Amino acid sequence: MPLTDEKIRENKLNRTFERYKALTIENCKNDSLKSFQRLRRLECANANGEAACISCGKVCNVSEMDGGHFISRAKTVVAFSPLNVHAQCKYCNQHLSGNLVEYRKGLLTKIGPEAVEFIEEIQDEEFKPSKWQYAVRREYYRSKIQIFRKGREA
């Protein structure tokens, strides 16, 4: 008897969690962030798979971009916030330390001043997910990526 979609998702989640048990909490966070940032880049892309850098406006394929954080990913409460993560060219993110002045200008245009103020205000709130919660996040983002890609292919 073939496995149901629900059972397949459960198996993937359990495998991820078993792997996470041997990792530090920081490694679990970083692993789940990779999937989240990939999803955010896809969400920022147009139908051709291209997006404009939130900081400088350069347009390129999202596979060549980063999921740049306005507020550092070290602040876990906003690290996984879609308001805080947008497609960003590698030059702005890696060589200009996020190009934050221009990033903020881009955010004000894209999400508005209220949303920018919101993420700035909550950044210092305490939020410490468990390894299990990181595993759930990773598998959720990976399933959303698959759905997103299937929708683009159709």
Image (cartoon, rainbow, N blue to C red):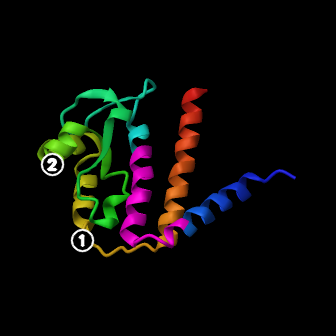
Between marks 1 and 2, how big is the CA–CA gap?
A: 20 Å
Mark 2 neighbour class, 10 Å CA radius: few under 14, some 14 to 19, many 20 or more: few
Residue 42, x across and y down, in percent? 43, 38
Residue that badge 2 annotates: 97
Report if the CB atoms under discs 1 and 2 are less than 8 Å apart: no
In-image side of 52 versus 129 (left or right): left
Q: Residue at x 67, y 61 (%)?
A: 11
Labelled disc at residue 124:
1
Residue placed most toward the observer, 5 or 47: 5
Mark 2 residue type: Ser
What span is in magenta?
19-39
Q: Residue at x 66, y 56 (%)?
A: 9
Residue placed most toward the observer, 44 or 111: 44
Compared with 141, 25 (above or below) is below
Q: Earlier in the sequence, mark 1 or mark 2?
A: 2
Residue 24, x across and y down, in percent? 40, 72
Secondary structure beneath label 2: loop
